[in-house]
Amino acid sequence: MFDVFLSNLPYLLKGAVQTIWLALAGVGVGTALGLFLGIISAMSGGLIAGSITVYVFTVRGIPVLVWMFLSYYMLPQLGVVIGDSYAVIGALILYTGAFVTEIARGAVLSIPKQQIDAAKGLGMQKYGMLRLVILPQAITMSVPPLLNNSVMMVKATAYVSVVGVWELTYAAREVVERTLAAFQIFLGVMLIYFLICYPLSIFARRLERRYSYEH
Amino acid sequence: MNTKPDMPMICVKDLYKNFGDLSVLNGMSFNVNRGEVLAIIGPSGSGKSTMLRCLNFLEEHDGGEILIEGEPLGYRVLEDQTRVRQSEAEIARLRSNVGMVFQSFNLFPHRNVRDNITMAPISVKHVAKNEADQRAEMLLEKVGLIEKINEFPSRLSGGQQQRVAIARALAMEPKVMLFDEVTSALDPELVGEVLTVMQQLAEEGMTMVIVTHEMQFAHDVSNRLMFIDSGKIIEEGAPADILRNPASARLQEFLHRFRTSFL
Amino acid sequence: MEVIIDFFGFNFIQSQLPRFWNGFQLTLAIALVSMLGAVVCGIVLVGPRMSNSSMVAGPVIGYVELVRNTPLLLQIYLSYFGLPLIGLPLSAFLCGVIAIASQHGAFLCEIYRAGIEAVSKKQWEGALALGMTRKKAKYRVILPQAFVNVVPPIGNQLVILIKDTSLVSAIGIIELTLSGKMVIERSGASFEVFLFIAAVYLFLTSSFGAGLRLLENRLRARQ
């Protein structure tokens, strides 16, 4: 029953590797960027926090697919000649970054004021407080939403196929066009995505239960 | 550390503090001498906690001056009366001489008991790790919690958490300890264990400022008692005198609510 | 056709406005119909999802997990290329709507469930102690409170839904995103077209978001 899927599995798995690569690059760099911006924005005020808010608002208000088209068309016209897959990774980074900024900012701001009082009372300065008290708690708290966000971004890597970058979903369409076995192939490929995403979701849920500090 | 025996430990001169339009402290002046245990009582909203938090610059005063062993805290007042805020490093250094224990314990939930105690000595005073560990063990012995050294705060009772918080503050070897209603958040049966530790500290000669609702404890442990209301000192003196013969109507009324007799 | 391209491509975009307008209308239509479908789909699912019997809840949980952990694009392809194979040759528009509504319905089902569970057990006990029947307690005490709890997360989910409508461009529906792509590829225009498209989406999502916040404040004020 799944003969067409199975005979095309090696090709599809090659696509899956490309998907994972895109996800690692986009989510990895985007998460680092977002953590940095989120912490900065929670710790600072005024112009810096304001411009970070504008970045988050703008990026999140526009579909990731539109960002992909934008960087796909824009970068070459601006004279930035990189491969198509690098152009769409830029969009993935931008997008992940915006969501992670919100997560990190929220986590830092949710550290109770009493924790800061206690650290100050012990003679700690800003940097020590950040390193020893605020960040360890904020980052632990952020891990579950960061994992959920990674799941979202793994799913978003599929959209690069619309722009024309080859990965798992693109490979699936190629196979369907050749074999017309839409059900088998698309369901099978959904299963592959599921196998990548589901463990992350489960892991996030476990941690969520474990890491709820009672202050 | 150089000590200045001729200076009062803490000197508060004409302290003012506002929260927006609300004036919380209205010109308070008092000294705390070396080895003295000062208890502060007063109705809620009287400004006693705010006053205590000012002594560690967790609240920043709007007027007046606080001197810790003669050194101004938070602001330097120049000759032309302008105030200059001290650098963060300077404030942190002054704070590390003043230990503080809070109503809600405020232990660091992501670190175990040992790390809660050694974190500040290692990172602020650059004490060697094994030295800080030894001191933590000694302090836990003192507050009777050595067997909890590897536990996380969430596994401890409120009374135990508060005793760890006291040990954490003592680990910085402060010259004075501030206690901000440290038993208010505790179940009644856990109050005693915390008060015992504080009593012991007082007997060892630690300079202490205690904001409390425990009248009997204030009576027993302090050398001097201060009643404040509306951000002003209404009465101060020897605890037995003040509690038995309150001069002001406000203190009489306040004590009446506790219906405690001090014999 | 004479195309004037100025520095920001403004005149050019103006000349293409009718095409974008058609795309915008289609985007709006897909979003509205899908929203309706998703909200209803979530309501249909949440009852069985919260059932104590695993025979009933199990399949719904499986469906929700599958949908939440696979890309929406594949679900769109599956309905567009798959439904005709089982004798349902629906229009691209309907296929897109079905896929979007079933994905977001799964997310909404979980949001409803969390909202209902967040109304504490004490409220149940309180209502029952007053002598209400379980049914009365459910409709008069629990669900009204749950409703207020879930308005903000539903709103966030629907904003994501609006953005997700861009994916139906992959099955040839000339909505806003695809109209942008077609203008670029047919006339060799430059990327400014997509800056314009992005701005339109931003306007759409942010005005929807602002409307929601207004609704939230109204609801909270009434409590």
Image (cartoon, grey):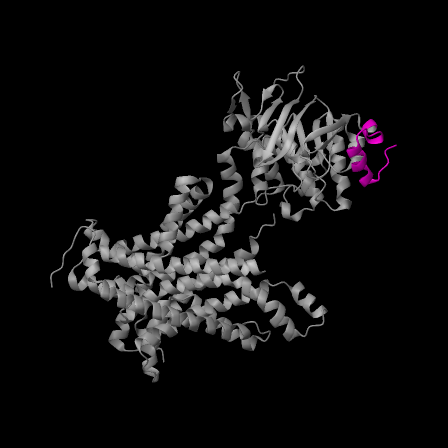
Q: Is residue B194 left or right of residue C171?
A: right
Position of residue A96 measured from the top left corner of the image (x, y, whole percent): 38, 53
Position of residue A160 measured from the top left corner of the image (x, y, whole percent): 30, 61
Q: Quadrant of the C terminus of chain C?
A: bottom right
Closer to the camera in the image, B80 or A67: B80
**Magenta span includes B118:** no
The answer to whether residue A91 is visible is yes
Quick one: which residue is furthest to the top in this view? B6
Q: Is residue B86 above or below residue B259?
A: above
Q: Is residue B181 left or right of residue A57?
A: right
Give the quarter of the image for residue C220: bottom right
Q: Is residue B103 above or below residue A184?
A: above
Closer to the camera in the image, B168 or B249: B249
Q: Residue at x 26, y 77 (%)?
A: A179
Position of residue C204 measured from the top left corner of the image (x, y, whole percent): 36, 60
The answer to whether residue A199 is visible is no
Q: Is residue B101 left or right of residue C23?
A: right
| Total numbered badges shown on the rendered structure | 0
Q: Residue at x 73, y 28 (%)?
A: B38
What segment is highlighted magenta in the picture?
B241-263
Quick one: which residue is furthest to the right in this view? B263
Position of residue C104 measured from the top left corner of the image (x, y, whole percent): 43, 68
Q: Residue at x 56, y 55 (%)?
A: A210
**What is the magenta segment's predominant secondary structure?**
helix
Quick one: which residue is furthest to the bottom in this view? C87
Q: Quadrant of the N terminus of chain C?
A: bottom left
Quick one: which residue is furthest to the left in this view? C2
Give the quarter of the image for residue C85: bottom left
Give the quarter of the image for residue C211: bottom left
Q: Is residue A95 left or right of residue B261?
A: left
Q: Is residue B35 above or below residue C216?
A: above
